[in-house]
Structure formats: structure tokens, C-alpha cells
Amino acid sequence: MRKSLALIFTLTLIAAVVLLAFYSTGRLDGDGVRFVDGIEYESGGFTYHGGLKEGHFEGAGVISFDGGARYNGHFINGRFEGSGVYYDGWRFDGEFANGKITGGTFQNENGETVVYDPSSGEIIFAGRDWNYDGGFNERGQNGEGTFRFQDGSVYVGDFYNGLAEGEGIYLDALGNLIYSGGFVNGLFDGQGEYHSPEGWSYSGGFAYGLFNGEGVYKNGSEMIKGFWENGVQTINYE
């Protein structure tokens, strides 16, 4: 369980910083800005085509930055307002209010997406063959969530910094329980119960993804109680 979305969160954070950096004052004029034919501004870092009102960008417009980034959307009083699309290798398509992102979808060049709806509090992350729904912060998935993998298997439980951490369950693509218990740093850790696709099971201690500590192994009518270290049984309880 090592899938992380740190790149997506980084893009999300960068987008917010970039957008606010250019429009925090609500006005784009002053030294170094050139007014052209009533519809264009040029400066050392961007060009603008669109509506203007009393020195502010107003209505529909397009900003092209020298580094290749581009915004196509609406403005009020010099700030992003309403619907718009921002490109910079990745893409944001959504809504703005007073220059700030209020909801929408981020998509990176690999097709991975982040969907944010603040009105419902819903956060959904999706790749080409996976998706995540749950809590997050700038370091990745955090809090409770559900992660669906490319093969159809599902993890439901706690996350910390983009990895499974705390209590959770892991189901295969058919919905069969594979593991239920503790996780640390994306691995089985603590007390848990593992069900093998081959039919046997183990219930007991885990560490770093391996059987560790006291546990019980079952395979049909066979049952073994013992103590394991790093996945190897070292003591057999009669």
C-alpha cells in the first residue's frame, strides 16, 4: 500500500500559490505595463487579451505567461472570478472567487486528477485506473478514506501523509477480505488478520508487513499457535 499522491498535492499547492501571487493586489498596472489598443496589457512576464474596466481586467480574458502558463476565463476587478481554465503542463478547470480557487478539477500530464468540491467537502483523486475519496492535506491522503487500485482491490481506513496508517481493511477485486487490522507506513503492522487467496489465514501480530509476535495460523482443519519473528515461526505452542 505504497501508492502516494504527493505529486498531485504539490501541483494543487503550486496552482494556488501561482494564481494568488499574480492577483493578490486585485490590480495589474503601473511601471512596465503597456496598454495596447484597449484590449491588451504587456509586462515583463505576461500578456493579456480581454475586457478592461478602470485599469482592471474585467469580463472574459486570456493571460499568457512567458513561462508557458495560460489562463482562460473570467475576471472581476482584476481578479479571477467565476469559471476558468489554467494550464501549466498540468490543468485546472473550475471556479474562482475573489482570485481564489473555490472548486474544480486539477489534472496532471499523466491524466491523474484531483476533484475538489468545498460545498460538500468531497475530495476525489483519480488516475487512469485508480481513485481515492477521503481526507487529504499538502502531504497526501490524511484521515479516513477509500483507495481503489488498478486491479480492482480496495483499501478502506486511515491514512497519514499519503500512506495507509492506523486501522483499515484491504479487499480483493471480488470484495473478499484479505487483511483487517493495523497499518504503519503503508504496511501491515500491529494486530491484524490476514486471509490468503489460497485459503489459509493468520491472526496475530505483524511488523513491517510480516508476521511478527504471537499468532494463529489456520489452513482447513490445521491450526498452529506460535510466535513469529520477521515472518518465520520460531516457537510452536502445543
Image: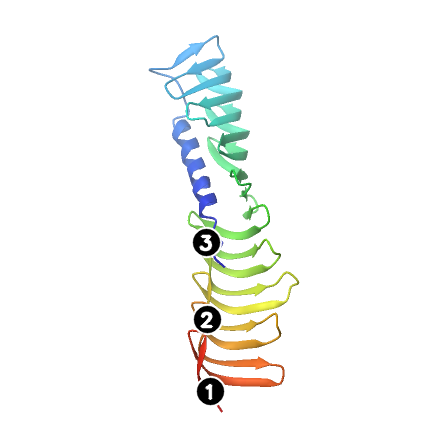
Name the residue located 45 percent from the left edge and 36 percent from the top edge: 15
User: Given the current orientation, which residue lies at the most extreme bottom position?
Assistant: 238
* Number of the front mark, 2 or 3: 2
Spatial CA span between label 1 and label 3: 38 Å
Name the residue located 50 percent from the left edge and 72 percent from the top edge: 192
Question: What type is the residue that disc 1 sits on?
Answer: Asn
Measured as percent of width and height from the top left, residue 153 is found at 60, 59
Is residue 77 something one can see in this rendering? no
Q: Are marks 2 and 3 in contact (CB under 8 Å)?
A: no
Question: What type is the residue that disc 2 sits on?
Answer: Leu
What label does residue 236 carry, if any? 1
Q: Sequence order check: which comes first, mark 1 or mark 2?
A: 2
Side (left or right) of 211 relative to 169: left
Q: Which residue is mark 3?
A: 162
Secondary structure beneath label 1:
strand
Q: Which residue is mark 2?
A: 210
Measured as percent of width and height from the top left, residue 156 is found at 55, 61
Among the 4 quarters of the image, the one containing residue 28: top left
Secondary structure beneath label 3:
loop
Q: How is the image coloured?
A: rainbow
Spatial CA span between label 1 and label 2: 17 Å
